[in-house]
Amino acid sequence: MTTETPTPATLDPAAEELHTVGEVAALAKVTVRTLHHYDRIGLLVSSRRAENGYRLYDYADLERLRQILLLRELGFRLDAVAEMVDAAAYDRRRALIAQRELLRERQRRTDRIIAGVDRALAAMEEEKPMETTTMFEGLEDFDHESYEDEARERWGRTDAYKESMRRTRRYNRDDWTRIKAEAEDVMARLAELLQEGAHAASRAARGLAEEHRRHIDRWFYPCSHAMHAGLADMYVADPRFTEHFEKRGEGLAAFFREAILANAARRRNAP
């Protein structure tokens, strides 16, 4: 009597299709080594095991891997990817919509750059100068220095300002695009809560306030809950910040401030 090596199809005829690590690597166009690494760090742990101990991946595992690879393609670090896909409030549909918009923005920027290259080539072929009004289209950089002089005057002596300058000097255009996309996603969801009539101290609003604090902490400088509360006061005291938030919805600046303060108070009083 011969003993068959169990395959994903024969482990349980009633079960959904399962895939070995090699099959998943081939499907996703990644290396087996990458999948083993994701398993070691807990980012993608296979849901099943064969009798011989080999990893077996089900459809949910493949969905998670697709999210991981998409976020990696958008430039997110593995620690940020893990934080996002493991968040209790992670909404795959909302995430896909945001990721699609980010990819479209990248495509629009690339198209503008290509159009600029085409104009430059045409000008060379025609032996004439480019139009100065359009020669820099597509090369606009993120204007992260627009308030640098004022920021240096107000906070230049603080450790937070120095750390922010140290980090942001390393960021490229893609980094700034990701930073902007993350911040806008939080603001969009806050505006939705405000429109739905949610309370600023609700769990959902506090959760978004915490996402915003971690966004600052990850990209700019260590941001404690006390520091975040200080920023919240500035968001309603400085008309420029208020105007920025009010573009999303009337009353959003005050709503955001209350959510931040509620989140900080809850964290401070937590056992």
Image (cartoon, rainbow, N blue to C red):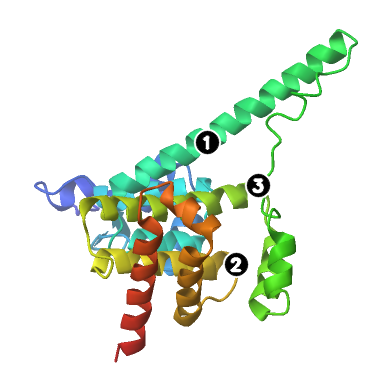
Q: Position of residue 125 (x, y in %)?
A: 85, 10
Q: Kindly state the secondary structure of the residue where label 3 is placed.
A: loop
Mark before the other along the chain sequence, 2 or 3: 3
Question: Which residue is depicted at the point 89% across and 12% down?
Answer: 128
Q: Is residue 257 above or below residue 267?
A: above
Q: Which residue is mark 3?
A: 142
- Residue appearing at x 36%, y 41% in the figure: 97
Q: Which residue is mark 1?
A: 105
Residue shown at 74%/23% (left/top)?
A: 134
* Residue 75 horizontal side relative to residue 120, left or right: left
Q: Residue furthest top?
A: 126
Instruction: Give the amino acid at mark 2.
Output: Phe
Which residue extends farthest right?
127
Q: What is the C-alpha distance between the residues marked 2 and 3?
A: 15 Å
Q: Secondary structure at mark 2?
A: loop
Residue 213 visible in image: yes
Helix, strand or loop at mark 1: helix
Q: Which mark is residue 220?
A: 2
Amino acid tagged 3: Phe
Q: Quadrant of residue 150?
A: bottom right
Left or right: residue 205 compared with residue 108: left
